[in-house]
Amino acid sequence: MSMPPRPASPRSVPTESKRKIRERAGKVWDLLAAAYPDAHCELDYKRPLELLVATILSAQCTDRRVNLVTPALFARCPTAADYASAPPDELERLIHSTGFFRNKAKNIRAACAVIATDHGGKVPADLDALTALPGVGRKTANVVLGNAFGIHAGIVVDTHVGRLARRLAFTRHTDPVKIETDLTVLVPVECWTLVSHWLIWHGRRRCPARKPDCPACELRALCPSATP
């Protein structure tokens, strides 16, 4: 019995010129914008501090789970100083269900201590200052800058963005920083924040890791990995 076709590997796709890749990418972004006009960060927050904490909690955890945890957490700790002074065991109890709760609690307390002492209690709107905070990497910083401040400092690369970027043959890399570098030359700066939301929403709704819905995919005609 013949096996069903598998999504093609980008490695099998004939080499495209940089101009052709940019043209195809532009069409992809247009289609994603049309498919997901309401795409947005799915973490619940009202202030930059809340988004920073929620993003730290989202590591190895679903946004839905984080959103179940944060109402009580935000009520208990409305300021950076509140997080910094919260007893570790209390903070760990509040975030326990997000996983890796001890390390997350440690990073949140340490980051908020720096925010309280060095930044007047306000989350800095600067990439270098954010990534200098304990437990805050480039991905988290990009989430906060793009969504809380409207600053397009980079492109958030999570598992969905990385997977789709490879399937679309916009990158061959697995390292998030290298994927981000490849994407930034294909996306207008003003869309750097939105393109992450488009790809994440598409990855969750149409192109999951195991069973991508290629027959119904809006990008099928432009995707080198689409099945027949």
Image (cartoon, rainbow, N blue to C red):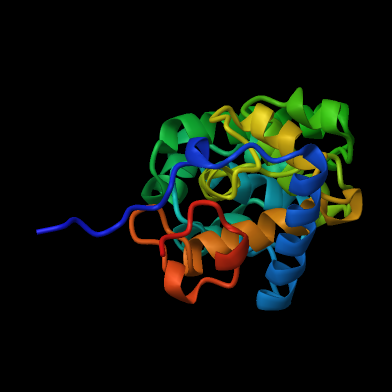
Question: Residue 6's x, y, as percent?
Answer: 33, 53
Figure quadrant of residue 41: bottom right
Closest to the observer: 29 or 123? 29
Q: Which residue is rendered at x = 61% and y = 47% of the image?
A: 55
- Is residue 152 rendered to the left or right of residue 31? right
Question: Residue 70's x, y, as percent?
Answer: 55, 58
Figure quadrant of residue 119: top right
Residue 150 in view in this figure = yes
Looking at the image, residue 79 lies above or below residue 42: above
- Is residue 82 rendered to the left or right of residue 164? right
How many labels sit on residues?
Answer: 0
Figure quadrant of residue 99: top left
Question: Residue 97's x, y, as percent?
Answer: 37, 51
Closest to the observer: 193 or 81? 193
Question: Residue 200's x, y, as percent?
Answer: 59, 58
Q: Which residue is rendered at x = 57% and y = 32% of the image?
A: 172
Residue 136 in view in this figure = no
Q: Which residue is rendered at x = 43% and y = 32% of the image?
A: 102
Closest to the observer: 134 or 118? 134
Q: Which residue is rendered at x = 16% and y = 57% of the image?
A: 2
Q: Looking at the figure, which quarter contains the N terminus?
A: bottom left
Identity of the residue furthest to the front in this view: 14
Q: Looking at the figure, which quarter contains the C terminus?
A: bottom left
